[in-house]
Image: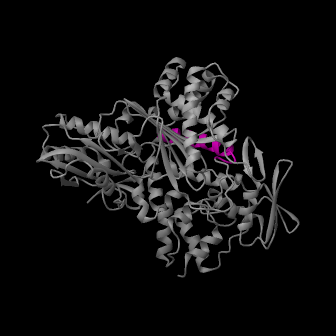
Amino acid sequence: MGIEGVGLPGAQQYHWAKYWLTAREERWRNNVRSVVPVPDGVSTEQLIEALRRLIAAHETLRTVYPRGVRTVLPGDEPRVEIRDVTSEPDISWAPGHFDELLRTPFDLETEPQARFSLAVADGKPRWLFFVFHHIAIDTFGVLAFQRHLAGVLDGSTPAARQPADGAFPAAGERANDKVLDYLRGIAGRFPASAVPLAVGSPRQPEIRQATLDSGSGEEIRRMARRFAVPESAVVLGFYAAAMCRVTGNRRNVIRASSANRFRPEEVDHVGCVAQTLPILLTPPLDASVPQLLGYAKRALTPLYRFGRYDYFRAREQMLRARFSAGVDTDAMLAFNYVDRSAERRSFREIAEQEALITGPEGKVVFTPLEVDTTDRFGLFVRRSADRFTLTVRWDATLLGAEFVEDFLIGLHDLIFRAAAQPGLFVNDLLAAAPLPTLPTAGEWITRDGCRISLDDTAALLADCPAVTSCRVADEAGRLTGYVTGAVDPFTLRSYMAARLHEWPAVVVPDHFVVQGADVGDGRSGPPFPAADPPAKALEAALAAVAPDAGWSGASSYVGAGGPLASIGAVIDVLRGNGFTGLRYADLFGLTPPAELVERLGDA
């Protein structure tokens, strides 16, 4: 029997949603892996006993998540595979073995989210591999786990550590409300585009990564000391400035995470507490390097100021903003900075560890991406005692490898130039750095410092099945869609808002003119036709989780007032009434109610 817990904490909510939004065969991509050498003198039995004690101490290592409720098992033996590698002449077997462990998915609802493999040679344990699902642990949790394991092997007694609270107490609720207010402000000022490229037609993302083993780490460290800013702020400042030049956008939102945003007690937490926050950036390009870095330091303040927050409620806000404002509130650049200088040196012989590649300094190395991400373009920075790497993860259907290579080398060059001449204006440094720029073919407009493709906006509008012809025009700052076809503005806005993630340089028009009639912006919809059995089933399912909500005039499940935390309950009610056509993704996004009715299936 398990101990029934509370709902998921905010950081885990994200991974729960990702699990249900990802095809079963791809779910392994949200696993986290690492490896540590086993100290001399430690036996296999001692190591397994150490794992047993850690699992007893850390609830997250023996937790399952049926229906999104954290349920702690009273005890669980470590799942340790023993692999005898005595006959292996070298460790060439290790990367393949690591991949095999990584690519085995977890079942969040029925099994604890940790597995181990122990390589033994000549009867002695040599290396311990471990894989967790991201819902159970994050990068900082992995480092804490390694420290705790070393401590237990050295003879310490692990302290029982509880997971982060899932329910928000009064003080936590007030802090959460502050984060939601912050996010509401971001949503209200969201840039029109993040990576403004005209794509012509939607496509499935192909995420790749490229890594530069950079010598700029020491320059970053010196600038951080000289100008009294965190190293993460140094990198963020130059990254934000570089992206202004690369994209042509003056404003950007960056989904950011930084290792030093946690309170000291959280740094030692084995679990999943890491959350990202969007930061709205307009870096000063007509300023000196110290001014740019001071701006980046202030921009990072939300990461230090805000703690955990309710991801589902934040996501609801962003979805409503996407429909209302007509911009893709998921479209952000990414930024992540982790300093691992204090980490124990581990398993250097394996070329790949946690998606980082060792290559000659100054050379960009391209590799397959073994972790899950949806960002179109992101910079991931890692510092270790003797190594500083800049990694870009990007959508290869949008940008070629040559562009990404040029960006990494250009960013590397920009940092060195700035370190040598910090008194120069940032614009001058950007002009001298060999950074690439995005192509600008086609018809574009700029709104609030961001580029919008009129060609792609018209192409997305034309994709709506009820549209027979259309054009888009910028009229004194108001983007207007002229449409012919048996369609209303609410349907047009609903259709476009739900598909913005496929079109990186598109926004929903501010106004629609249909068949020559000046008919409005489409933000309010018609009554919901609740007479048919599928529509009645939707009404009943929504009422079961949110009695005060209603489908009438709604743009989606979230627009109707449906809580994202209750999607599983809604689907259960529908299935109980014989309707099995809806998936988690249908309610998690902006699927219009009319489309939900079509997908329900027959009772």
Residue 16 position, x and y percent, is 44, 56
Q: Is residue 3 visible?
A: no
The region drawn magenta spans 170-194
Q: Where is residue 205 drawn, in percent x and y?
A: 55, 58
Q: How many circles with numbers are drawn on the protein? A: 0
| Position of residue 100 measured from the top left corner of the image (x, y, whole percent) | 31, 57
Q: Is residue 190 magenta?
A: yes
Residue placed at 48% from the left, 57% from the top?
17
Is residue 464 toward the left or the right of residue 275 in the image?
Answer: right
Residue that appears at 50% across and 62% down: 567
Identify the image quadrant of residue 551.
Answer: bottom right
Query: Residue 90: within the magenta?
Result: no
| Nearer to me, 66 or 458 | 458
Magenta highlight: main SS = helix
* Residue at the extreme bottom: 602
Q: Residue at x 51, y 23 (%)?
A: 224
Which colour scheme appears in the figure? one colour
Residue at image coords 58%, 41%: 406
Furthest-right residue in this view: 516
- Taking depth in this image into account, of 37 and 519 the one nearest to the observer is 37
Residue 150 higher or lower than 575, as above or below = above
- The residue most toward the left is 123
Q: Is residue 169 visible?
A: yes
Q: Decide if residue 428 is on the left or right side of residue 269.
A: right
Q: Nearer the viewer, residue 41 or 410?
A: 410
Left or right of 32: which side holds 372?
right
> Where residue 586 sits: x, y (%)?
56, 66
Q: Is residue 402 left or right of residue 496?
A: left
Q: Quadrant of residue 414?
A: top right
Q: If the image is split into quadrants, where does the N terminus sit?
A: bottom left
Along the line of sight, the residue nearer the viewer: 404 or 152: 404
